[in-house]
Image (tube, helix red, strand yellow):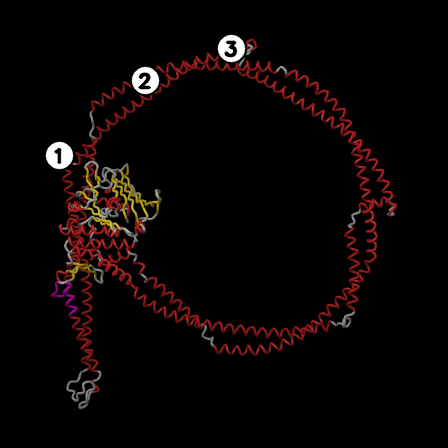
Amino acid sequence: MIPLRLDIEGLYSYKEKQTIDFTQLTAAGLFGIFGAVGSGKSSILEAILLALYGSTERLSDRGEKNSMLNLQSEALLITFEFRSGKNNSQTYLARYSAKRNPKNFEDVKPAEHTFYKKSGEQLEPISEGAEQILGMKKEHFKQTVIIPQGKFREFIDLTPGPRAEMMKELFGLERFDLAAKTGTLLKITREEKIRLETQLQGLEEIHEELLKEKETLLKANQEEIFQQKNALELAEQLFKKQEILKEKHREWKNFQSEWESLEAKKPEIESKKNQWKDFLKAKTYLKPVWEQLKDQEADAEKNRISIIDCSRFRDRYAKEIQDHEKELQELKEKAEQKSAREAKIRDLQKVIEIKDLEISLSQWEQAMDKLQPALSSRRLALQQISSEIQNLEKTLEKQGPADSTLLADWKSAAKEWQQLESTIHKNREELTALMKKISSWEEKSQTLLQSLPQGHKSFETAISTSKNQLQELEEEKDNLGKKAGLAAHVHLLEEGKACPLCGSLSHPDPLEAEKESQTLSLLQEDIQNLKELLENLQTQSQQHREYSIHLSNFRDQKDKLSEALEQLENQLQLLRQQLTLQGIPSQEELALKITESETIIRKKEESLEKLKGLRTQWEKERGLLEEEESRLRAAENELVGVRSKILSKKEEIKDPEFCKAFYPKTREAIQQAIEKVEWDIRETAFKLEGKLKVLQETRDKETTNLANLKSYEKNLEANLHKIKELETHFENLKKEHVFKDQEALIALFDHSLDADKVDAEIRQFEDRRLLVKNKLQELGSTEGLTTFSEGDFVRSREALKESQARFAQIQKSQALLEQEVKTIQSRLKEKKDLQGLFAKVENRESNLKELEKLFKGSGFVKYVSSIYLKELCHTANVRFMKLTKNSLSLDIDDNNTFWVIDYLNGGKRRLLKTLSGGQTFQASLCLALALAEKVKSLNQADQSFFFLDEGFGALDKTSLRIVFETLKALRHENRIVGIISHVEELQQEIGVYAKVELDAERGSLVGYSF
């Protein structure tokens, strides 16, 4: 994470908006943020934590937003722009804002906390928080990137368990926690093993001998199938011969029956044949002539009717043309008067315009009569408002100025007084509770010490003594065990015979096996009791260490709380002294002063507000007066203009005498007269045009009608001539084709006989008759047809069925045997495959059991975590040994506890907690730098950022110089380090820095060295 820009407004002492531009600060590699104690330096880190994680270090996550907001601010706003992600390539913006409740100063509304991702110049809202963007929790962020006051040595003070958990979360070591996955795999493997065992149990009866037995039966059955197949083929041939003979016999009988039916139908077919021939002659030769004759007769009738119609229309069109010509002459005479009538219309329109202007003239005269009194009233009201303004200004001059700054100071002091008393009361309650906890833990610690064995004052000496005693008893037990082994051979010893072990012939003091066994039993009981005692001592020692840690933490909290309480009481005393100098000895007097001052200010504000309203009203009235005066002048101008227009319009009239009669009439009556004349002019023109068109159309119709009359007369003459020719031709055809009866001939014309269908029916009958005759002759020559017997056919069919049944039965047996052989072969293969899988699963189960033992209880994660911590110590020692001039180095044991190797005392180890304050700072700095370096590598970043607000005041000048040289060297490692301090020596050494100063009026202000 690389910071770019931080905006703070309304946080703690930051009253006004302040911007910290990290761009030039981080470009230097090493920069500082300096200022006096209480100026607001550490608030910069608080603001970053608030923007990223929504909580501050001082107030933790308790949500006391009221204490965060500046007492003179109504809102808190922090925006933090930074780079993060792989290689710090992505830019983000974090925004945190909170506002006070306008109705309750102590109440702060819920904060708004949002993140944005920068794409070009656009900001896109995102749902991820700081943990997802940075990849670490707030606690780890405070231990690796930004380290606030009081948190620098927190990583060292962590117990081994939380420290290992931090390494796990920070470096993603949960991927090494494989116990659950291993357990799942082992469970699956065991289930698979049970499944395979179950399947193998079902295949126990399948073996090679069973397969050989079935294959022998299959071979014998195949020979029987061959014999039965030959018998079946012979039966099929015999049956097929009988079946063919039966089919031919059936066909012969059917054709015989059909021949008899065809012979019976022959007379009917002959009759249809004759009718079909007459129909074809009539349709082909006579019907076309007959149809032409009828068409000519119909055309002749149509022409006669058309001649009658045309003769009637000829007389009517002549009469219509004469009437249209007379009406046309009358319309032409009326149209010639159009110009004179239009001139009178224009004069009447001028009369209408004059009447409209006279109405407008009357309206403007009435408007002027109304405006005069309103103007007088408006001028009087303006004078009264001016008088009120002068009187109120004199009253305000007498009141004098009000001190709003002093009122704000008093309000701030009243609130601070109340908050200080509340905080002091709360701290005293917490201090009392801490004292009770300290007393309780001291009693628990003393109770544990009283349980020590007599003669021991500490658990360490008691445990050491118990371990020595246990070692002595174990050695004695080993010796007794050896003797017990020798006692097993005592029964072989005989006086005068060589000992099998040493070869001695004399055995004066042989071992007593029973006595040695009793001694060994008592010794084992003592060892067991001593082990239990040692285990209890170790448990109690661990408890005592935990009690000591708790006591140390509570005492530190008590000291810090006492110090904070003393500071708060001093602040309250100073506030009381300042108010006493102003003549305010108590909170009641202060509240009274605030009330009096607020009353004075409120009255003055009311007077000012009233004065402001009067001035606004005066401006409004003056504007209205100017508007009304302007309207009066406009009315006068309009009045003159209207009178001038009336005179001009009267001069434009061409026929004044004609118009005199219309002046007394209304505008609507004049307009109706104009519209009536205009309509008559338009109607005359329309009728004239229409009449011309109608006359022309009538003349065209007359011409067309005369032409049609001549055409119809000519066509009728041609029709009559053609009819005569066709009648002669038709009579000749009747004689030629021997049709004497004309009615019968006409009936044939209208007959619905389908000639093609009848022809097809005749042909089909003759073809079928010939086919049946040939088939009867062909079948009659077949051998054995006349002697065919149904009994012979049935016997051959039954013989075939019996043969087929025997063959099918043998085939079924064959199929069953083949299926059994295939099934046995398949299941034998399945059995071999399952046996192979079962062996693999057994081997996998064994391996997984071993892995489960290794991963149980997060053992592998703890192992990897210890490797990370050792690597961290190794990296930190590069700087720590340089800072301590090779006199000290850091180490970590198997329990993840930090130790220090003291090379000035023979390289012996001691706990890291035994270091002095300055040495602890050096160790913490080196570990923090090493941890930040690991995080940088983890995030794949080319740069890393580290902010430090701690501990420089605890170093002497030499150590300070060495630390400073170490920090400057980080620039060559592409590391950015920010330092917050009030130490002047550091300020002189660091050239690029931001300066924070606390202004009494404006709050904390940020400046730069560049």
Residue placed under numbered mark 1 in the picture = 581
Rounded to the nearest whole Å, what is the CA distance between mark 3 and mark 2? 48 Å
Q: Residue 381 carries which label?
A: 2
Percent x, y of residue 376: 35, 14
Q: Which mark is residue 651?
A: 3
Percent x, y of residue 314: 76, 25
Name the residue located 79 percent from the left edge and 39 percent from the top edge.
Answer: 295
User: Hey, what amino acid is under mark 2?
Assistant: Ala
Percent x, y of residue 115: 32, 45
Left or right relative to 614: residue 419: left
Dot placed on the residue nearer the N-terminal end, 1 or 3 = 1
* Position of 499 relative to 612 (above/below): below
Q: Do the residues labelled 1 and 3 touch (CB within 8 Å)?
A: no
Q: Which residue lies furthest to the left in this view?
A: 455
Q: What stretch is highlighted in magenta?
A: 451-468
Percent x, y of residue 112: 31, 43
